[in-house]
Image: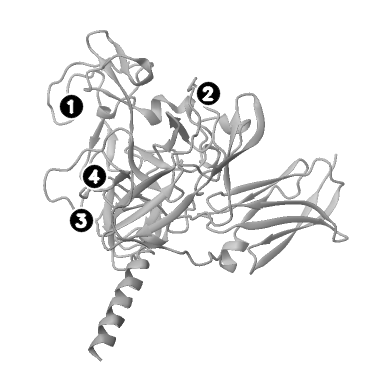
């Protein structure tokens, strides 16, 4: 009996560990999905050979290991600021703590390069781009600009490099494609601040939905989860769904001679049209939320709260946006980690591990019906927009009124938008079928011709 109980306890422990969101939340590629990209001047997507999303998830008692190429299922590129790099397979192993712990000492600063990973294997970077002001030359130095800056006034990549982000708000560094910010496409923002999607149309990891708790979209290198832009107003999981807000704000300054805490520092450039407020990370100050402001985040851009994946509560970061859904500093994680940074890229796995085999992803009837098809009536194209995070492969089919298949496509895990080109179809009524394999939703589409 003792042996049976011990074995039962062991199996229960293994089962409980395997149910950890840091194991089960990754978008594993089980159907051979590959990445794709655009090149400048060509609005047609080019299909690549590199496997997209997550290749494999493995775990031990204390760690989860992620094998990934860093390639999303949505198209990447082009990068219109002259970035010579392109999305390149990283073919790497990343290790995250299964039992993350708060840092009770001095907080650890986020750094340049990877500070976390989204659930599709794409890297998360913090606010910076490796460029800072040089007082010796009165110019920017570092990164692709060359030379060394003072590292006193550090340039904000989200502001300064916007012209080099693709439609999905990402770009590569030496082939390592990454996001500095909320990974939802520019064209899905309420106020669109980039026109790159006009010719090089793509989507992001998820679409913001203001009436549902945001999905879990990644993990920081301290092991704590990262969510999208919306959550429960109250940290105990009650109240309405609201936009979760950054507690950082732009300082009221015209010169850059001090930090927000009053410390005098090497001067940076004055605030002007070339270097507007927000161009440097040090242009921001942290304002402690007042009592009752439960939808405002702490200095790490997170809070301890109940989420759908953690009904008992967890510390969680949120990808902050403005009321117009444009990215809001510090964007995801930072400028310091809440927990003990323990994750990172490893060359090999040096302990016994278990391979996590994901169960077949499913979609609810409500989610299927909540997919938006627009415009309707249509004349040039039909777009299908998944609201939230898509974890399944959906088969799309367009039939004429006689039942003849005239167009087909698919919406992949980690994608939110698919299109049908209908310019060659006759005017009339059509049937659009959206199927997950187990559930199908059919709706009428009208095509009009002038």
Q: CA distance from mark 2 to mark 4?
A: 32 Å
Q: To which residue does mark 4 refer?
A: 337
Give the numbered dot on residue 101.
Answer: 3
- State which tag comes first along the sequence, 4 or 1: 1
Tag 1: Cα neighbours inside 10 Å, few (<14), some, or many (≥20)?
Answer: some
Look at the numbered disc 4 and give the secondary structure of its residue: loop
- State which tag comes first along the sequence, 1 or 2: 2
Residue 312 x %, y %: 29, 68
The quadrant of the picture occupied by the C terminus is: top right
Tag 3: Cα neighbours inside 10 Å, few (<14), some, or many (≥20)?
Answer: some
Which residue is at a point 24% across and 16% down the rendered structure image? 268
Q: CA distance from mark 1 to mark 3?
A: 30 Å
Q: Is residue 366 left or right of residue 5?
A: right
Look at the numbered disc 1 and give the secondary structure of its residue: loop
Mark 1 or 3: in front is 3
Q: Is residue 168 left or right of residue 40?
A: left
- State which tag comes first along the sequence, 3 or 2: 2
Q: CA distance from mark 1 to mark 2?
A: 33 Å
Mark 4 or 1: in front is 4
Residue 391 x %, y %: 52, 58
- 212 or 65: nearer the viewer: 65
Give the numbered dot on residue 259.
Answer: 1
Q: To which residue does mark 2 refer?
A: 80
In this view, 104 is above or below 360? above
Asked if the residue at tag 3 contacts the one at tag 1, i.e. Cβ–Cβ closer than 8 Å, the answer is no
Residue 4 x %, y %: 29, 87
Q: CA distance from mark 4 to mark 1?
A: 20 Å
């Amino acid at each position: 009996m003792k042996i049976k109980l011990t074995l039962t306890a062991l199996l229960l422990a293994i089962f409980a560990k395997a149910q950890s969101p840091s194991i089960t939340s990754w978008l594993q590629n089980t159907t051979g999905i590959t990445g794709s990209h655009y090149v400048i001047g060509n609005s047609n997507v080019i299909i690549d050979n590199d496997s997209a999303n997550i290749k494999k998830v493995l775990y031990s008692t204390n760690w989860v290991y992620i094998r990934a190429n860093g390639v999303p299922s949505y198209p990447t590129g082009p990068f219109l600021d002259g970035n010579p790099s392109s999305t390149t397979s990283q073919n790497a192993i990343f290790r995250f703590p299964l039992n993350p712990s708060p840092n009770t000492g001095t907080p650890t600063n986020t750094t340049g390069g990877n500070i976390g990973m989204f659930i599709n294997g794409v890297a998360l970077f913090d606010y910076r781009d490796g460029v800072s002001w040089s007082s010796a030359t009165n110019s920017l130095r570092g990164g692709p600009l060359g030379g060394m800056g003072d590292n006193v006034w550090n340039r904000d990549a989200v502001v300064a490099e916007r012209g080099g982000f693709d439609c999905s708000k990402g770009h590569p560094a030496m082939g390592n494609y990454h996001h500095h910010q909320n990974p939802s496409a520019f064209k899905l923002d309420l106020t669109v601040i980039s026109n790159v999607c006009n010719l090089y149309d793509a989507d992001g990891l998820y679409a913001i939905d203001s009436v549902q708790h945001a999905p879990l979209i990644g993990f920081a290198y301290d092991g704590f989860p990262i969510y999208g832009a919306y959550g429960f107003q109250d940290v105990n999981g009650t109240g309405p769904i609201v936009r979760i807000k950054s507690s950082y704000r732009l300082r009221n300054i015209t010169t850059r001679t001090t930090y927000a805490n009053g410390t005098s520092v090497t001067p940076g450039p004055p605030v002007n049209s070339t270097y507007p407020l927000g161009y440097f990370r040090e242009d921001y100050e942290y304002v402690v939320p007042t009592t009752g402001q439960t939808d405002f985040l702490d200095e790490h851009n997170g809070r301890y709260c109940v989420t759908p994946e953690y009904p008992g509560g967890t510390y969680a970061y949120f990808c902050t946006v403005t009321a117009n859904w444009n990215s809001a500093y510090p964007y995801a994680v930072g400028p310091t980690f809440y927990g003990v940074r323990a994750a990172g890229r490893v060359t090999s796995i040096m302990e016994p591990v278990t391979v996590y085999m994901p169960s077949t992803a499913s979609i609810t009837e409500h989610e299927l019906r909540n997919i938006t098809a627009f415009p309707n009536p249509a004349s040039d194209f039909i777009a299908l927009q998944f609201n939230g995070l898509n974890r399944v492969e959906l088969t799309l089919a367009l039939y004429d009124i006689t039942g003849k298949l005239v167009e087909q496509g698919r919406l992949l895990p980690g994608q939110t938008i698919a299109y049908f080109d209908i310019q060659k179809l006759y005017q009339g009524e059509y049937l659009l079928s959206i199927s997950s394999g187990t559930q199908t939703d059919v709706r009428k589409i009208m095509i009009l011709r002038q």
